[in-house]
């Protein structure tokens, strides 16, 4: 029997039950983007009623229960977070952006980041050039074709995209062509499959979209590839494998598949394998459902390669990749009285090297680092990252634009990066009171917040990503602009994903937004920006200077051109 709202949210130990249908979850669909905070107006989420702590049909394991069977490697990892980087490769440098759209980054007085200082030496300067574009050129874009997530695998040879139609398209990097020594291997379609279908919750009369919210690759262990994909409610583990041989010479069936009469079989044959055209198969190996009452916004694979987390607006669950009917609730910020709700979880991620550490961000602009060794239920964080707010700059939109839309650990694990509406911040895990680096993405929009609030653009969730050496970061903006910041030289650049510059090997020209005064040639006015064209999702190759940028229904791939 489900718990009632009058019961404390910490008292959860429901009796195990078999997984039920997807529509059996109680309560409303999610905490959406508007709610009234205890401090006043804070458009972030709607009022939500919920009939139970765990959805019906899901075995709600108490967070107090041991989980040794979930992560044996946790007992092998001890010690605190690393004090510095393990080192990184030389960084790439961009040409000066002549006062780019975001201006110079601001830094607090601190020593250069370990492992990247002085990494961008002379002679390694490069420019970005066009490589490929995927997708139709149609002016009328179908809603189902809009790309909703982009992700490279660990080697960078595969690139996966998910769209609002529930489809996953995987691109594979071809081998470099010897006849074109100056060209890189291109990405071509490797596999396409329907990951999620639209569903309908009959109990709540609520549609469940098929949109792919996140894709996360698992490290490759054999010839097959595995990835996790999720929509608002259900997470699926997919296996992508190749088949280039087929068996022939069966005893009990003919070549066309029809069964043979056993009495007419006079001799036994040994089946043999014959070559066939390469076929790529995508099959669902696990389905993790009925564990989230609210919309899933994040999934993150643990460094132990056995577990992963999934986060929604109010809870974070820990899963084992082999167990689909149980998960452990490790974070629960749902208040006993929903009218006291003041913030929601916006993103979560595991540490890249320590399987017991993860972070999650909130709509208040704060980040909490949790250690699962200290407590099974991580309601008490180990570290709390928050930048003090300047009272003189506070406005009606302060809480909205400070909401963090994405959080990413650096590859070294020493730093983490957060993206809010106007800026990107880099935090040192050893310093909680302020970020070590702040980069303004589109500060020129601060004067346009009122109109952006009216057209709902102020609620757009921009993602961010690191390059392979953690020396540069990238994030998106409006008008199909995307921004890059070199952490070593403090240079920044604004580039545009456009078919106008889609000639092979065409060098991308830096763009600049005119914020006032007389507009120069090749500059674009703030009033001329197209807010319907936006770069929300980006990805950077893990080892090379190759980037993937999703612009509505098109996927642009750019690479560096060595001078």
Image (tube, rainbow, N blue to C red):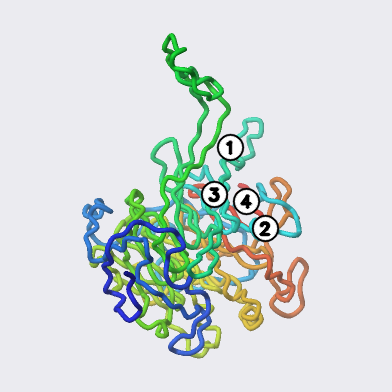
Q: Earlier in the sequence, mark 1 or mark 3?
A: 3
Q: CA distance from mark 4 to mark 2?
A: 9 Å
Give the residue pinned by disc 4.
558
Are the residues flagged by discs 1 and 2 in contact, CB closer than 8 Å? no
Q: Position of residue 127 (x, y in %)?
A: 63, 53
Give the residue pinned by disc 1.
174
Nearer-the-camera pick, 98 or 534: 534
Q: Position of residue 6 (x, y in %)?
A: 33, 81
Task: Tell how many labels.
Answer: 4
Residue 355 position by quadrant? bottom left
Q: Earlier in the sequence, mark 4 or mark 2?
A: 2
Q: Earlier in the sequence, mark 4 or mark 1?
A: 1
Give the residue pinned by disc 2.
497
Does dot 3 land on a helix, a strand or a loop?
strand
Question: What residue lies at 46% left-to-right and 58% top-to-bottom?
Answer: 234
Q: Earlier in the sequence, mark 3 or mark 4?
A: 3
Residue 147 position by quadrant? bottom right
Give the residue pinned by disc 3.
160
Image quarter (top left, top right, bottom left or bottom right) of the N terminus: bottom left
Does dot 2 land on a helix, a strand or a loop?
loop
Q: Is residue 544 left or right of residue 70?
A: right
Q: Is residue 36 above or below residue 409?
A: below
Are the residues flagged by discs 4 and 1 in contact, CB closer than 8 Å? no
Q: Residues within 10 Å of mark 3 (few under 14, many from 20)?
A: many
Task: Specify the label residue 546 is tagged with.
Answer: none
């Amino acid at each position: 029997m489900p718990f009632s709202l009058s019961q404390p949210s910490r008292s959860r130990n429901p009796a195990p039950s078999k997984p039920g249908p997807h529509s059996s979850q109680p309560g409303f669909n999610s905490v959406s983007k508007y709610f009234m905070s205890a401090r006043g107006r804070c458009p972030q989420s709607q009022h939500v009623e919920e009939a139970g702590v765990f959805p019906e049909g899901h075995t709600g394991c108490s967070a107090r229960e041991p989980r040794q069977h979930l992560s044996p490697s946790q007992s092998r990892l001890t010690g605190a977070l690393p004090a510095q980087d393990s080192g990184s490769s030389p960084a790439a440098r961009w040409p000066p952006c002549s006062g780019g759209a975001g201006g110079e980054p601001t830094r607090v007085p601190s020593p250069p980041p370990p492992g990247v200082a002085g990494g961008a030496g002379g002679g390694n300067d490069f420019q970005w050039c066009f490589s490929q574009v995927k997708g139709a050129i149609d002016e009328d874009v179908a809603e189902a074709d809009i790309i909703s997530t982009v992700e490279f695998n660990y080697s960078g040879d595969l690139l996966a995209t998910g769209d609002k139609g529930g489809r996953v398209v995987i691109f594979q990097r071809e081998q470099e062509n010897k006849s074109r020594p100056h060209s890189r291997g291109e990405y071509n379609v490797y596999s396409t499959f329907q990951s999620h279908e639209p569903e309908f919750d009959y109990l709540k009369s609520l549609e469940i979209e098929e949109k792919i919210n996140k894709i996360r690759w698992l490290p490759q262990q054999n010839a097959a590839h595995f990835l996790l994909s999720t929509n608002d409610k259900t997470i699926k583990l997919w296996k992508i494998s190749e088949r280039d041989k087929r068996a022939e010479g069966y005893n009990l069936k003919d070549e066309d598949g029809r069964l043979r009469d056993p009495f007419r079989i006079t001799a036994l044959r040994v089946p043999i394998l014959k070559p066939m055209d390469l076929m790529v198969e995508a099959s669902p190996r696990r389905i993790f459902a009925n564990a989230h009452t609210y919309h899933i916004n994040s999934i993150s694979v643990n460094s132990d390669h056995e577990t992963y987390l999934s986060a929604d607006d109010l809870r974070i669950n820990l899963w084992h990749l082999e167990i689909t009917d149980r998960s452990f609730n490790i974070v629960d910020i749902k208040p006993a009285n929903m009218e006291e709700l003041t913030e929601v979880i916006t993103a979560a991620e595991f540490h890249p090297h320590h399987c017991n550490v993860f972070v999650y961000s909130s709509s208040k602009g704060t980040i909490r680092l949790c250690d699962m060794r200290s407590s099974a239920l991580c309601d008490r964080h180990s570290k709390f990252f928050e930048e003090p707010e300047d009272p003189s700059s506070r406005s009606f939109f302060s809480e909205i634009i400070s909401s963090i839309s994405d959080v990413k650990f650096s590859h070294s694990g020493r730093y983490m990066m957060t993206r809010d509406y106007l800026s990107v911040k880099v935090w040192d895990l050893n310093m909680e009171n302020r970020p070590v680096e702040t980069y303004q993405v589109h500060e020129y929009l601060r004067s346009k917040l009122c109109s952006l609030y009216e057209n709902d653009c102020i609620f757009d969730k921009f993602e961010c990503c690191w390059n392979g050496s953690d020396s540069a970061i990238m994030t998106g903006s409006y008008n199909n602009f995307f921004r890059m910041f070199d952490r070593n030289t403090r240079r920044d650049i604004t580039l545009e994903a456009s078919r106008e510059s889609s000639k092979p090997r065409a060098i991308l020209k830096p763009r600049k937004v005119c914020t006032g005064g007389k507009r120069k040639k090749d500059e674009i006015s703030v009033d001329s920006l197209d807010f319907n064209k936006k770069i929300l999702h980006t990805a950077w190759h893990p080892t090379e200077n190759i980037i993937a940028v999703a612009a509505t229904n098109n996927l642009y791939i750019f690479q560096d051109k060595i001078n």
